Every structure is written in C-alpha cells, then in structure tokens.
Image: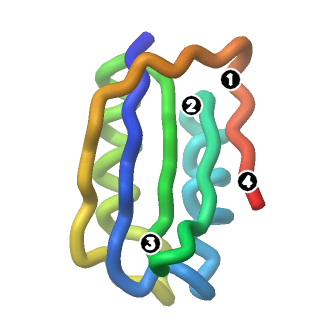
Amino acid sequence: MKSVRYLIFGRVQGVAYRAFARDLAQQLGVAGWVRNRPDGSVECVAAADGEVLRFFEIELKKGPRWGRVDKIEIYECRQAFDSSIFKIRY
C-alpha cells in the first residue's frame, strides 16, 4: 500500500470537492482523509495500491462539476491507515 498527499488548488472550496473526493475514495476502497485549508486549497491524504491511486489522482484532477482544478501538488508520505475508511476532516 502506498500513501500520497495531494494539495489541490483552484476553485475547490464551496463546490463539494471534499464530498466528491470522499465518494470517489469510498468507491475505490481508498483510505485517508480530505480537508479544506485556510488558503483556499484542499488537502487530501490517500492510501491504496498504486494502480488505484493513479486512477484516484486522475479523477481528483477533474474534480466535481462545479469546481475547477488548476494545479495539484503530489507528495509521497508515510502515513499508515488501519482501515479503508476515508473521512472529511473539518
């Protein structure tokens, strides 16, 4: 299992981006969390097999219908998760 941290920039707050990411993660069996950041971006930490994370990343770049993703920064991380639960953090 691989863990990745995403910083998503664009029109990603107030457009249901966190719910979009959570629903996508639950469909794919991705563990982790997503939250809004004070600077208007969204942060997401996800853990799954490499192929699943690649598909997850492609969809994160598209975002929800009402949003617009301008840029995603991607960082490998070492965060471990006990289950396949994906949560919205507030």
- For label 2, the crowd category at 10 Å Cα-Cα, with few meaning under 14, some 14 to 19 and many 20 or more, is many
In the image: residue 66, left or right of residue 68: right
Q: Image height check: is 58 above or below 85?
A: below
Q: Residue at x 50, y 34 (%)?
A: 46
Q: Image height check: is 17 above or below 76?
A: below
Measured in 3D between alpha carbons, the distance from the residue under mark 2 to the one under mark 1, in whole angstroms, is 6 Å
Q: Which mark is residue 89?
A: 4
Lower sequence index among marks 4 and 3:
3
Q: Residue at x 37, y 56 (%)?
A: 7
Residue 15, by quadrant, is bottom right
In the image: residue 55, left or right of residue 28: left
The amino acid sitting under disc 4 is Arg
Q: Residue at x 64, y 18 (%)?
A: 81
Q: Quadrant of the N terminus?
A: top left
Lower sequence index among marks 2 and 3:
2
Residue 33, by quadrant, is top right
Q: Position of residue 63 (x, y in %)?
A: 42, 69
Q: Position of residue 69 (x, y in %)?
A: 32, 75
Lower sequence index among marks 1 and 4:
1
Measured in 3D between alpha carbons, the distance from the residue under mark 4 to the one under mark 3, in whole angstroms, is 14 Å
Q: Position of residue 59 (x, y in %)?
A: 37, 56
Q: Which mark is residue 41?
A: 3
Q: Position of residue 44 (x, y in %)?
A: 50, 49
The residue labelled by disc 1 is 84
**Residue placed most toward the observer, 38 or 18:** 38
SS of the residue under disc 4: loop
Disc 2 vs disc 1: Cβ atoms closer than 8 Å?
A: yes
The amino acid sitting under disc 1 is Ser
Measured in 3D between alpha carbons, the distance from the residue under mark 1 to the one under mark 3, in whole angstroms, is 24 Å
Query: Is the image coloured rainbow, by chain, by secondary structure, or in one colour?
Result: rainbow
Lower sequence index among marks 2 and 1:
2
